[in-house]
Image: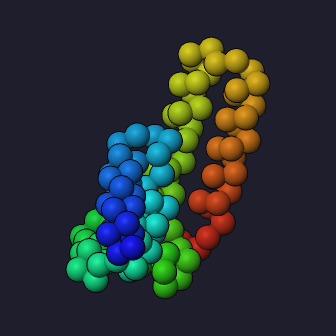
Amino acid sequence: MRYLWAFFGLICVGLAMGGVILPLLPTVPFLLLAAFCFGRSSERLHHWLLTHKTFGPLIDDWNTRGAIRPRAKYAATASIVATFAISLLLGVKLMVLGIQAVVLSAVLIFIWTPPNG
């Protein structure tokens, strides 16, 4: 079972790294999930993730205060706005735009309601 948890943790880290580049792929939720998986599988990987120069502080902010750093909030908001603007420019159907607007609005609410880290 430990290998399965480690495998899922590594997949989550990969998805989080993709989220740094891709606008609709979230980074922090995948990092939190990876930390959870590594906590169940490998102390070494768990320690690596929590002490990582870039990812560690984001996880620590969430674990200790349930907070998201303002820079991460602004970056996520910019990505969401850019994604919706691209959808508008591409002429995506109105129903799809409506669904996208509702989902992205929910994500923005989730991002902006926690305290700043």
Residue 108 can be seen, yes or no: yes
Residue in the picture at 63% in, 52% down: 107
Establish if 81 lies above or below 1: above
Image quarter of residue 110: bottom right
Residue in the picture at 50% in, 41% down: 24
Q: Nearer the viewer, residue 64 or 85?
A: 64
Count numbered badges in the picture: 0
The figure's colour scheme reads rainbow
Left or right: 32 in relation to 93: left
Left or right: 26 in relation to 44: right
Establish if 84 lies above or below 18: above
Q: Nearer the viewer, residue 42 or 65?
A: 42
Residue 28 can be seen, yes or no: no
Residue in the picture at 64% in, 18% down: 92
Left or right: 107 in relation to 102: left
- At which x and y percent is residue 11? 36, 55
- At which x and y percent is residue 95? 76, 24
Q: Nearer the viewer, residue 22 or 4?
A: 4
- Residue at the extreme front: 1
Residue in the picture at 56% in, 38% down: 81
- At which x and y percent is residue 1? 39, 73
Q: Nearer the viewer, residue 11 or 100?
A: 11
